[in-house]
Structures are given as C-alpha cells and as structure tokens.
Image (cartoon, rainbow, N blue to C red):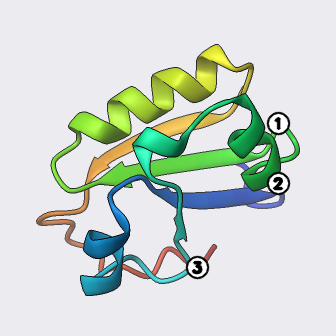
Amino acid sequence: MDSSRPSVLLDVRTEQEYIVEHAEGAVLFPLDEINADTAARTIPDKDTAALVYCRTGRRSKMAADILAGLGYTQVCDIGSLEGWPYGKDFGI
C-alpha cells in the first residue's frame, strides 16, 4: 500500500469492544452502522485506503465487502488483530 496516500484504520466491532481495547489511531465504525451515508461521512474520498479489522475477521470481511460495494477502491481486510505480532500501532 502506498504510504503517501491517505488511509484510515477502521475498527468495525461494537463500541463496548472498542472501549476495552483498540488499535492506536483506529476509528470506530461498527459493522451494523455501515451504509452509504455513514461511509461518506467516515471516509469521504472513495480512493482512501481503508484498513478494516475486528475481533475474529468475520465482521471485517463483511465490512470490507460492503465498502467495496459502495465504491471504495482501496479496501483491505486485515481480519483479526488477535495474535498480530507487530503491536497495535499502525502509524496511520
């Protein structure tokens, strides 16, 4: 992924899960709230790199599919951060 391009790290879990722990710099964007209007507010530029994660990878896959269906061109499903060996600071 081109580091000079705008990017956003999206946590698609619930607010309660986000409060307990989340990756540094992540934006809370619960799966059940993703639609055309909320996506446009959260990610105004459809060419922004959107990195999506959740607890197990199931919701991130669904969220990535929804965003791609809404026309977002740079969606990356990170899946689960459980066991992620690089820490939770993505430097985004």
Disc 2 residue crowd, few under 14, some 14–19, many 20+, Cα 10 Å: few
Q: Earlier in the sequence, mark 3 or mark 1?
A: 1
Q: Earlier in the sequence, mark 3 or mark 2?
A: 2
Residue 26 at x, y percent in the picture: 52, 71
Residue that badge 2 annotates: 5
**Res 1 seen here:** no
Left or right: residue 18 versus residue 84 is right
Tell me which residue sits at (73%, 54%) in the image.
Answer: 42
Q: In whole angstroms, how far apart are the C-alphas of marks 3 and 2?
A: 13 Å
Give the secondary structure at mark 2: loop
Quadrant into which the C terminus falls: bottom right
Quadrant housing residue 8: bottom right
Front of the two marks 3 and 1: 1
Residue that badge 1 annotates: 47
Tell me, for residue 83, which label it has, or none.
Answer: none
Q: In whole angstroms, how far apart are the C-alphas of marks 3 and 1?
A: 19 Å
Tell me which residue sits at (37%, 69%) in the image.
Answer: 15
Whether the residues at callouts 3 and 1 have beta carbons within 8 Å, the answer is no
Residue 39 at x, y percent in the picture: 70, 41
Q: In whole angstroms, how far apart are the C-alphas of marks 1 and 2?
A: 9 Å
Residue type highlighted by circle 1: Asp
Residue that badge 3 annotates: 91
Which residue in the rendered view is the most extreme toward the top? 69
Residue toward you, 41 or 49 = 41
Tell me which residue sits at (30%, 53%) in the image.
Answer: 54
Residue type highlighted by circle 2: Arg
Give the secondary structure at mark 1: loop
Disc 3 residue crowd, few under 14, some 14–19, many 20+, Cα 10 Å: few
Above or below for 52 versus 58: below
Residue type highlighted by circle 3: Gly
Whether the residues at callouts 1 and 2 have beta carbons within 8 Å, the answer is yes
Whether the residues at callouts 3 and 2 have beta carbons within 8 Å, the answer is no
